[in-house]
Image (cartoon, rainbow, N blue to C red):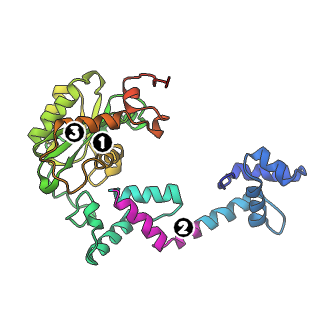
């Protein structure tokens, strides 16, 4: 059964021309490339007193969509979707975008934050799945970032536009995953095109250790390091040393804009499958980290046309089963 999809204005003009030529609904559906049911619904819902006219049909369709978006509320179904993704450690920004794209539901990330904090006041634990679980998020309204500024910070606006295209190997995103009670951390790096992931355990998220770990992880792939993008955590205060050692610039995402490093955020979520939130990192071994890294890099990804990050990063064809 063909899924129903919204018709475009161009398709509506095509439908009008075919109707005028005396074509049946079935034939129109074949030519336009949609189901016969789609054509039937279109003619029923968008036909006017003077028959089917494409311009008026588009206006009717757009009006219904605007009204539908206005009527979206925090229903039990929407709340269930939101809470399910929060518990997967998705950020409110990611959830908002996902609801719009996958479900046609527009809920702002601010509204999702409000729901999370209301849940906390009622004794819930949703807030624990936020990256800054113990700090209630507040609108900044242009105020300064009170976390302090990283000396020599170069913002993402200065990053070459080609990085946004994810069309080349060598543009990395970096972050840290923190253990229970902030004891121990993982430095994580992911290549934007191939999703190839590097992970290294450090004793803490202090800048010195993170800087050393980053250089060690990327030195073996120095010919595949063009740029690095991080968040504004103080653990990346050693960015100048990283840039000098690897001969690659380091750029910083805008504060509170986790989607600018969405791939790294998603990869950290995959890593949490093996090292859950609230677990101690003190006893994690290098062998365990290597095993997780191997699994992630040799797992087929839909976004890579079911190739593995390893094969894309090293431009190797997949081995076929005998």
The residue wearing badge 3 is 288
The residue wearing badge 2 is 69
Q: Residues within 10 Å of mark 3 (few under 14, many from 20)?
A: few
Number of marks:
3
Q: Which residues are magenta?
A: 66-88
**Residue 197 in view in this figure:** no
- Name the chief secondary structure element in magenta: helix
Circle nearer the viewer, 2 or 1: 2
The answer to which of marks 3 and 1 sits earlier in the sequence is 1
The answer to which of marks 2 and 1 sits earlier in the sequence is 2
Farthest residue to the front: give it.
Answer: 322
Mark carried by residue 132: none
Q: Where does residue 311 sit, x and y in percent of width and height? A: 40, 26
The answer to which of marks 3 and 2 sits earlier in the sequence is 2
Q: Where does residue 188 sit, x and y in percent of width and height? A: 24, 40
In the rendered image, the vertical position of residue 135 relative to residue 18, given as above or below? below
Q: Kindly identify the residue that appears in the image at 84 percent across and 66 percent down.
A: 50
Q: Residues within 10 Å of mark 1 (few under 14, many from 20)?
A: some
In the rendered image, the vertical position of residue 207 relative to residue 308, given as above or below? below
Mark carried by residue 156: 1
Circle nearer the viewer, 3 or 1: 3
Disc 3, SS: helix
Q: Quadrant of residue 154?
A: top left
């Amino acid at each position: 059964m063909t899924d129903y999809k919204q018709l475009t204005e161009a398709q509506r003009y095509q439908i009008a021309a075919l109707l005028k030529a005396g074509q049946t609904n079935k034939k129109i559906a074949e030519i336009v490339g949609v189901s016969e049911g789609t054509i039937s619904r279109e003619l029923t819902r968008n036909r006017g007193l003077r028959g089917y006219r494409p311009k008026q049909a588009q206006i009717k369709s757009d009006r219904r969509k605007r009204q539908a978006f206005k009527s979206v509320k925090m229903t039990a179904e929407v709340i269930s979707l939101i809470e399910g993704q929060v518990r997967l450690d998705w950020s409110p920004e990611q959830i908002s975008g996902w609801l719009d794209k996958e479900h046609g539901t527009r809920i702002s990330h601010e509204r999702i934050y409000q729901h999370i904090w209301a849940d906390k006041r009622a004794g819930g634990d949703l807030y624990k799945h936020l990256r800054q679980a113990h700090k209630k998020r507040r609108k900044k309204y242009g105020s300064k970032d009170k976390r302090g500024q990283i000396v020599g910070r170069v913002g993402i606006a200065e990053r070459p536009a080609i990085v946004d295209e994810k069309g080349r190997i060598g543009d990395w995103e970096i972050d840290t995953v923190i253990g229970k009670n902030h004891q121990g951390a993982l430095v994580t790096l992911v290549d934007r095109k191939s999703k190839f992931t590097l992970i290294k355990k450090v004793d803490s998220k202090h800048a010195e250790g993170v800087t050393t770990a980053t250089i060690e992880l990327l030195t073996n792939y120095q010919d595949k390091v063009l740029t690095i993008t991080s968040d504004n955590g103080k653990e990346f205060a050693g960015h100048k040393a990283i840039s000098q050692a690897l001969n690659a610039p380091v750029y910083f995402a805008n504060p509170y804009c986790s989607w600018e490093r969405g791939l790294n955020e998603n990869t950290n979520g995959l890593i949490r499958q093996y090292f859950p939130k609230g677990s101690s990192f003190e006893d994690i071994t290098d062998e365990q980290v290597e095993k997780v890294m191997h699994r992630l890099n040799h797992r087929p990804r839909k976004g890579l046309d079911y190739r593995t990050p390893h094969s894309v990063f090293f431009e190797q064809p997949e081995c076929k089963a005998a």
